[in-house]
Amino acid sequence: MSMTGYGKKETQWEDKRITIEIRALNSKNADINLRTPSFIRELDTEFRKVVAAKMHRGKIDLSVYIEFNGQNAPTKINAQIVNSYLSQLKEIGDASPGEHLAMAMRLPDTLSSDRSSLQDSEKKAIFQLLDTVINDINTYRADEGAALEKDFNHRINLIEKYLDEVIQTDPERSLKIETKLRDALSDLKIEIDANRFEQELIFYLEKFDITEEKVRLKNHLEYFKKVIQSDEVVGKKLGFIAQEIGREINTIGSKANHAELQKIVVQMKDELEKIKEQLLNVL
């Protein structure tokens, strides 16, 4: 699944229109930001729990908007206090009624809230709407994730193809290294101990041997393809596997000592970097 997504839904509950909007971007952890009306702030902790459990990870912005269509708005004007402010303002200086009213409304205690705790049915309506929005986003994330999976498989298959080329090239590379050493030694025209030379040659060639790296790289590529089939949240795991793939490719490159093999390594690195870039957006 991808980490990015957007969802917005609204519903009607009694005399209120409830709207929930969620935006999600990629992030290493669950970074949840809430924007909710003050009179439902008691639900913020539960909002965070639901979003974290169902969306797992990402930079998630959750906004809840509630519009009142009737006479039950939670905030009301304190008419007596406003009238008192108006009387005092008229005594202080001349101004139009509109200007006096604007000044009065900016003074303390002009608004009050007589809102009691939320009703259970209202909470249920809000969280049902939240579930709907999250389900929509997760459907979008899954669709985008399917496209990412297709791309990953394509690039992993390319790296496997390049690994096959490495396996085919390796015997020729080893033979060239050995021949180069023997020719260099013969050019010196000095007497050597043949047994000692063979021992040193074997030791030297072992330093350039990439058999273990080829085996480990093949296993990592197979494991990557296996993990990507999982229904679990695998973004971080795939990231760790990609790191191991990169480690083996780099080691093969450092041991290559062969122009053709180094070209193949560069091609593998290029495909792996494209995978790593896309993995930043995988849940």
Image: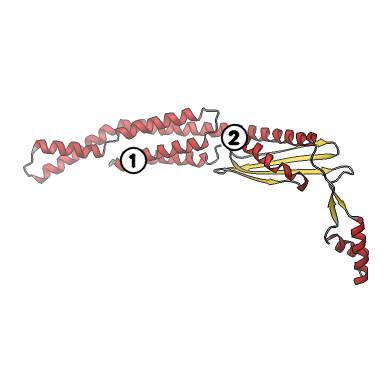
Q: Residue at x 85, y 47 (%)?
A: 114
Of tags 1 and 2, the one toward the viewer is 1
Image quadrant assignment for residue 176: top left
Quick check: 91 above or below 155?
below
Amino acid type, label 2: Glu
Left or right for 60, reference 95 = left
- Res. 111 mark: none
Task: Assign the N terminus to one quadrant of the image.
Answer: top right
What residue is rendered at 92% in x and 62% in y?
84
In this image, 64 relative to 77: left or right? left
- Density class for disc 2 (Cα within 10 Å; few <14, some 14-19, many ≥20) is some
Which mark is first along the chain, 2 or 1?
A: 2
Label placed on residue 251: 1
Mark-to-mark CA distance, 1 and 2: 34 Å
* Mark 1: amino acid: Thr
The residue that label 2 is drawn on is: 144
Say above or below: 161 vs 23. above
Relative horizontal placement of residue 199, taking residue 127 as reference (left or right):
left
Q: Position of residue 282 (x, y in %)?
A: 54, 37
Please give the name of the residue rendered at 12% of the width and 38% of the height, measured from the top-left corner. 197
Q: Position of residue 64 (x, y in %)?
A: 74, 43
